[in-house]
Amino acid sequence: MKNRRKKRVSPAFLVTLTLIILGLGLTLAGNGFASTGFQARGVEKQIKALIEENKLLEIQAANLQSIQKLSESVGNSASLVPVSKLKHIEPAK
């Protein structure tokens, strides 16, 4: 039988290998955090745009409701008569 000797791994090799593995892990983790940050910024921009659009739509809805209520109140009022012929008065120049 052959005499098998255990080969000892040098401590410098183990330290180097550990540093390489840690470096790769930190690089991959940093890349993941960066891409998550970019996605979060994109979502924040979308949220801001949607909030602005929502404000505009609420203003439009309020305007339409006020016009509708005004026309309903004018239509229901017995004291108002629709104008058949409208005359404009222009000031003298």
Image (spheres, rainbow, N blue to C red):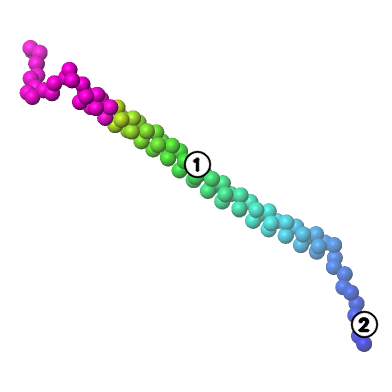
Q: Amino acid at mark 2?
A: Asn
Q: Which mark is residue 3?
A: 2
Residue neighbourhood size for the residue with mark 1, other residues' Cα within 10 Å, grouped as few (<14), some (14–19), many (≥20): few
Q: Which mark is residue 44?
A: 1
Residue neighbourhood size for the residue with mark 2, other residues' Cα within 10 Å, grouped as few (<14), some (14–19), many (≥20): few
Q: Main secondary structure of the magenta part?
A: loop
Q: Kindly state the secondary structure of the residue where label 2 is placed.
A: loop
Q: Quadrant of residue 19?
A: bottom right
Q: Quadrant of residue 66?
A: top left
Residue drawn at point x = 92 percent, y = 82 percent: 3
Q: Is residue 12 left or right of residue 45?
A: right
Q: Is residue 74 magenta?
A: yes
Which residue is the extreme one toward the top? 92
| Residue 66 visible in the snapshot | yes
| Residue 67 visible in the snapshot | no
Q: Amino acid at mark 1?
A: Glu
Q: What segment carries the magenta color?
A: 68-93
Residue drawn at point x = 56 percent, y = 51 percent: 35
**Comparing labels 1 and 2, the label whose residue is closer to the camera:** 1
Residue drawn at point x = 24 percent, y = 24 percent: 73
Which residue is the extreme one toward the bottom? 1
Q: Quadrant of the N terminus?
A: bottom right
Residue drawn at point x = 87 percent, y = 73 percent: 7
User: Where does the image place residue 78, in percent across and percent down from the top left?
Assistant: 18, 20
Q: Is residue 86 left or right of residue 52?
A: left
Q: For the residues labelled 1 and 2, say whether their Cβ atoms are less than 8 Å apart.
A: no
User: Where does the image place residue 39, in percent across and percent down from the top left?
Assistant: 53, 48
Above or below residue 90? Residue 32 is: below
Q: Is residue 13 magenta?
A: no
Q: Is residue 4 left or right of residue 35?
A: right
